[in-house]
Each structure stands twice: as C-alpha cells, then as structure tokens.
Image (cartoon, rainbow, N blue to C red):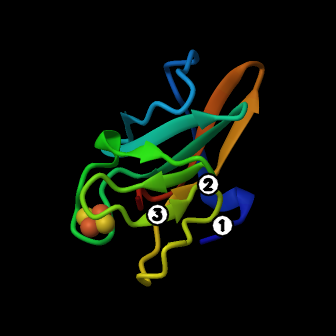
Amino acid sequence: MKYMESELEWLKVSDSIFDENVIKNIKLNNNVISIVFNNNRLYAFQSKCPHSGAKFSEGFLDKNNCLVCPLHKFKFKLTNGLNVTGEGYRLKVYPTKLENSIWFVGIKKENQI
Ligand code: FES
C-alpha cells in the first residue's frame, strides 16, 4: 500500500550495521516488524507470514531475493509484497530511506502497523 509522505512517521532503525540477507525483528512504536538488508538497501515488512503466521526471522531470501516463508515456502517480493508463488497472499511492506548514513522506516501515522 502506498502512502503520501505526509502520512508517514519516519522511525530510525537503531542498528545501522546490517548483515546482508539476515532477516531480523526490530521493535518500532511498540510493534515488531522484520527487516533485511539486501543489495545496499534496507527492506521492512510484517514479521509474521500472512498465510499462517510463521516468523519471517526464521525464513530466508532465495536466489532472486524473494522472501521465503520458513513454514510452507510461499515467496514474497520485498519491493511490493507480492506473493510470487501465486497463493494469493500479500505481504505488508514499509518504505525505507537512507539519510546521513542512517536508515529509517516509514510507518503510517496513528500507529497503524
Ligand atoms: S505460514 Fe508462511 S507460507 Fe504458510
């Protein structure tokens, strides 16, 4: 889902050193989301699979840089959350930006994760 810039609150990701392709959970505004650093970009997305709630922190990225759920192996595109294996689910993704060597995640204001 796309939001206007003014609808977003940009929250600093405290850990500015990331291990490539390692999916981690972080807490922002009292909500847990997942992040992964891949090809010089930080991606942020919901921490649990929209299918049956498996933890993406136990998943991995495939050779096409798609997020693979650890439980049933459904795959999702990091850029837009599209379920590329065709099961019809959608991953919630959050915009990210880099400013002065610090990564930020854009969360819709009013704490709606
Ligand atoms: S719980 Fe993720 S694919 Fe089933």
Q: Residues within 10 Å of mark 1 (few under 14, many from 20)?
A: few
> Cα distance, mark 2 to mark 3?
27 Å
Crowdedness near tag 3: few (<14), some (14–19) or many (≥20) residues, C-alpha within 10 Å: many
x and y, in percent, of residue 80 in the image = 62, 65
Query: Residue at the spot x=55%, y=21% of the render?
Result: 18
The answer to whether residue 113 is left or right of residue 71 is right
Which residue position is annotated with label 1? 3
Q: Nearer the viewer, mark 2 or mark 3?
A: 3
Q: Residue at x 24, y 58 (%)?
A: 71
- Return the disc, 2 or 1, that comes first in the chain's sequence: 1
Q: Is residue 72 above or below residue 36?
A: below
Q: Which residue is mark 3?
A: 75
Number of numbered labels in the structure image = 3
Q: Please name whichever residue, 21 or 46, is drawn nearer the observer in this view of the structure.
A: 21
Q: Position of residue 5 (x, y in %)?
A: 73, 57
Q: Nearer the viewer, residue 23 or 73?
A: 73
As helix, strand or loop, the secondary structure at mark 2 comes to strand
Q: Residue at image x 52%, y 28%? A: 13
Tell me the quarter of the picture where residue 26 sits. top left
> Horizontal and vertical percent for residue 17?
57, 15
